[in-house]
Image (cartoon, grey):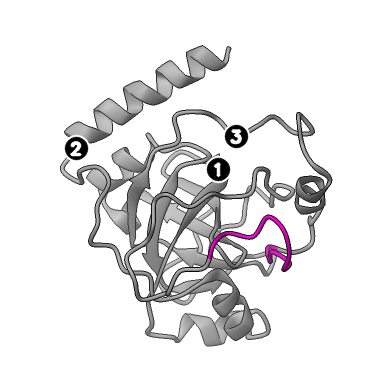
Amino acid sequence: MEDELIRIRREKLESLGKDDAGLYPNDVKVTATTDELHDRFDDRPPEELASLDETFDLAGRIMALRNFGKASFLNLQDRKGRIQVYVKKDGIGEPAFESFRKMDIGDIIFASGPVFKTRTGELTVEARQIRLLAKALRPLPEKWHGLTDVEIRYRQRHRSNRQPPGPGRLPETEPDRPADPGFHAQPGFPGSRDAHDAPRGGRGHGETL
């Protein structure tokens, strides 16, 4: 079964190599981390976020991915924690969205865009740009399979996207340096969110997925 998954991911990698975006870019610069966004915006009302004119550039590993036709939600984990990212075909353009659909859980990506809150109040980055930094050819371990106690602790953090200090944290890199596609991420992801976590109004949102 795993061999078949690896074969499929290799095919996706070959297909992505033919896209205009290219593979393994080294010109990506990260300007924010997930914990910085949570610190700044977790307690702010959705209306205030909708009025912001600011874009944030992050890089990390896809830990959960939920597709709904022309839109998707993913959980992005960097060296500081996790945040939800909303990817819409109309938001990043059709060519980029077609490339995005070839990305999998475990892939390391770059995501850039403003922040908003979903109907359930979760802080989310609305992607205006998505780029693949490194393709994960092997899937992340199955739930509860071969895990250490530290890893189980991360899996059970259902109420927060933040990653606590201690063993298992990603290595530190400076936010304004190119993203390092070689860092390791903690396996697992928190509980899935509401499948209808579409953006609130304020910037032309409000569609139902």
Q: Can residue 1 be seen in the rendering of this structure?
A: yes
Looking at the image, residue 184 lies above or below residue 41: above
Mark 3 lies on residue: 140
- The label nearer to you, 1 versus 3, is 3
Residue under the point 45% across and 47% down: 71
Name the residue nearer the viewer: 76 or 170.
170
Q: Are marks 1 and 3 in contact (CB under 8 Å)?
A: no
- Look at label 3 and name its amino acid: Leu
Q: Give the quadrant of residue 142.
A: top right
Q: Main secondary structure of the magenta part?
A: loop
- Look at label 2 and name its amino acid: Asp
| Number of the label disc, if any, that sits on residue 150 | none
Looking at the image, residue 15 lies above or below residue 203: above
Mark 1 lies on residue: 65
Q: Is residue 151 left or right of 39 when viewed as pictured?
A: right
Residue under the point 44% across and 48% down: 108
**Callout 1 environment at 10 Å: few (<14), some (14 to 19), or many (20+)?**
some
SS for callout 2: loop
Image quadrant for the N terminus? top right
- Look at label 1 and name its amino acid: Leu
Mark 2 lies on residue: 19
Indicate whether residue 173 is drawn in magenta: no
Name the residue nearer the viewer: 103 or 185.
185
Cα gap from disc 1 to disc 3, whole angstroms: 13 Å
Q: Can residue 209 be seen in the rendering of this structure?
A: no
User: Which contiguous range is marked in magenta?
Assistant: 161-171
Looking at the image, residue 64 lies above or below residue 92: above
**N-terminal-most mark, 2 or 3:** 2
Residue under the point 53% across and 61% down: 78
